[in-house]
Image (cartoon, rainbow, N blue to C red):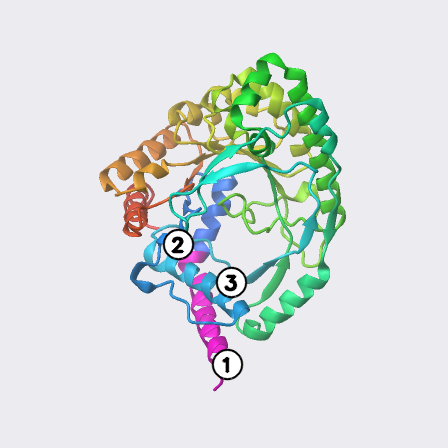
Amino acid sequence: MSNLAKEREIVRELTKRYLEIALSDRHVRMRRRFRDSNDLKIVRPPLIMEEIPWHEMNFEHALDCVCEDPGLCGMEYGLRVALFREKYFRCDNYIEPVWVIGKSYSDTGNGFAIREERLAVDRNNGIVSHRYEDVLADEKSLERYHDPVITPHPENDRANKERVEEIVGDILPVEVRGHGIYYAPWDQIAMLRGVEPILYDMVERPEYLHRIMRLFTRAMTLTMDQMEAYGLYDPRGLSLHCTPNSVTLPHEPEPGRTYLCRDIWFRTMAQMFSTVSPAAHDEFDLQYSIPLAARCAYTYYGCCEPLSDRIDKLKQYPNLRKVGCSPWSDVERTAEALGGKYVLSRKPNPAHVARRTDPEQVRADIADTVTKCLKYGCPCDITLKDISTVGYRPENLIEWAAAASSVLDEYYGEA
């Protein structure tokens, strides 16, 4: 047997193990819980870990890859990561019995480019310090704007699908799927300017910030129009920012159908607005994104910014379904304001796994979330994310998942 044939057999064997997990009763129940939670039912909250520093996670050599062929190596690593999650993380590791390929397309952007300096402590870690140059400092800088142009590449989709099918298609169905929406204009503007100039401009040049937001809103409107026209959206897209977005849909997917904005989730946030008032948050962000979100099936708002004092503002979204509850949010205030009408998406503090995990601290934190959500009849999910480092101790995440899951066992029964 040639070396390439051996490598293909390795990928095929890993795929068989992957499929066995995806078809298991536990995973069928788990996928149903994801949907039930987003359908506003009180069930065991999905427990998720994402944005993991995988370069620190090769516990017991479980992520060692042997394939040398570039295409096969990528497939092998993806499968080993999925199997690693299932073996070591007692979480809801969302695995579908299908190999998903994202539709290929290119985007010219809006003409604005980041200029920055970076400082890295660990060259293997993609999380680094940034110092951004203000490239949108004055009116003249806005002249660089141009409308975005989206170009689909169906030829790439066909080639990618044929390649994967030729390797594992007799084991696992292969599907080409479109994408969801992830819209974070203030993340982009902060990287184009730095945060301080924006905060000063809210007071000194508010109309200038409005002009910038009008350009970003125009660009997003045109992007949504083109993505929709080219059939690049899909309610079963790969991820809703760390949580599966294919689990609550306005209707069941139909093979071969072209999906529109009204079929998918709208994911948005304004993370740098942690220090601005609810009124300013509403003026500079919500009023621009609400019309965009209204084109979609559901809206999921919030990430790291605390939103406890502005839930009433968020309820202006006509299709609001889920709200982020960051480590700096008041869980009780958020759960009370959301009640049974929206999902509370809790984000525990990733600093708790940066050096060494304290299981008792984890259990107390998770118990606090679930007791307050149950008190107000508020459905929730729990997502540990933004994990910059675990100090090269994979055990930190293994212990966190075990401790968090043990609390959910106590309140809801075993998964």
Percent x, y of residue 367: 30, 35
Q: Residues within 10 Å of mark 3 (few under 14, many from 20)?
A: some
Residue 92 in magenta stretch: no
Percent x, y of residue 182: 59, 40
Q: Report the residue at 38% width, 62% height from top.
A: 63
Look at the picture and state if 19 lies above or below 330: below
Residue identifier under label 2 = 55
Look at the picture and state if 50 lies above or below 84: above
- Tell me: 333 left or right of 311: left
Percent x, y of residue 298: 60, 37
- Tell me: 352 left or right of 74: left
Q: Secondary structure at mark 3?
A: loop
Percent x, y of residue 171: 52, 72
CB-based contact (under 8 Å), mark 2 and mark 3 = no
Residue identifier under label 3 = 97
Look at the picture and state if 93 lies above or below 353: below
The label on residue 5 is: 1
